Amino acid sequence: MIPLAQMAVEVLGTADPRAKTDLSRTHAAAWLDARADGTLPEIGTGTPPDRPARPDRPELLHPRDVPRRKPGTPEGRIALLHAVAHIELNAVDLHWDVIARFSHVPLPPGFFDDWVRAADDESKHWGLMSDCLQAAGSHYGALPAHAGMWRAAEETAGDLMARLAVVPMVLEARGLDVTPGMIEIFRRAGEDGAVAALETIYAEEVAHVAYGSKWFNFLCGRDNLDPRPTFHDLVRTHFHGLLKPPFNEEKRADAGLPPDFYWPLTEEA
């Protein structure tokens, strides 16, 4: 088995979404099977690209230039599925990037186990959204997408604690807030396949936020830092904009995010 960091770089260097997610799942299975057998394969070190390889489509636009479509229409629901697929593909790369980019940091093996599991989940989620798009007569790449998805990775490339604060504890936590509303849109439209896919994503994203919270608190403890003000400082430094309620406080609590972490970030310091 090649070192884990090299696996991560291979996924990041694969442009085709289906090939990327298939390779991600293959590498994740190899790592997790070895860990289940009680062995610890080599983690190694890797040099991830500044930006992951991407296909020619979708066209990537500034967020303000991505067309808005009403979710009450079939076209709007396809656009919503496409947006989720784009988020999931970026999440695959984000989780492999944290493995490769911070493989030199002394960390317990469980850190790598968690992010391999998260990358595997996100690869499955992209496949679920791709299947839903095909069922609706579309495909990933048929519509333009948000060009700013990798910004959080670039902002936090040199700071593991900032990466954990911004990606799982802010961006993925936002998914816990908005996914129930998306599920209801597809339920009202009678699109049971999309409902089932989004419910799977919703259930599994809680764990990803929890991984971020767990390892953020671990690093704070190791460095004798108070987690709450440290989180506030990192988010205000590396995340552009304020957090926007309403929040899914129940699911955020399940993921280890108490309200005093995120409510103060709805206002300027």
Image (cartoon, helix red, strand yellow):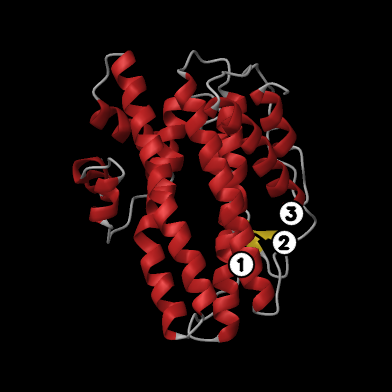
Point out residue 159 in the picture as x, y percentages from the top left corner. 48, 24
Q: Secondary structure at mark 2?
A: loop
- Marker disc for residue 82: 1
Identify residue type, mark 2: Pro
Q: Are marks 2 and 3 in contact (CB under 8 Å)?
A: no
Point out residue 165 in the picture as x, y percentages from the top left corner. 39, 35
Q: Which residue is mark 3?
A: 18
Looking at the rendering, in which quadrant would you find the N terminus? top right
Residue at image point 54% right, 78% down? 77
- Disc 3 crowd rating (10 Å Cα; few below 14, some 14-19, many 20+) is some
Q: Earlier in the sequence, mark 2 or mark 3?
A: 3
Q: CA distance from mark 2 to mark 3?
A: 14 Å
- Marker disc for residue 58: 2
Q: Nearer the viewer, residue 247 or 23?
A: 23
Q: Residue lying at the far left in this picture: please name it.
A: 260
Residue at image point 59% right, 32% down? 33
Judged by depth in the image, the label closer to the viewer, 2 or 1, is 1
Q: Earlier in the sequence, mark 3 or mark 1?
A: 3
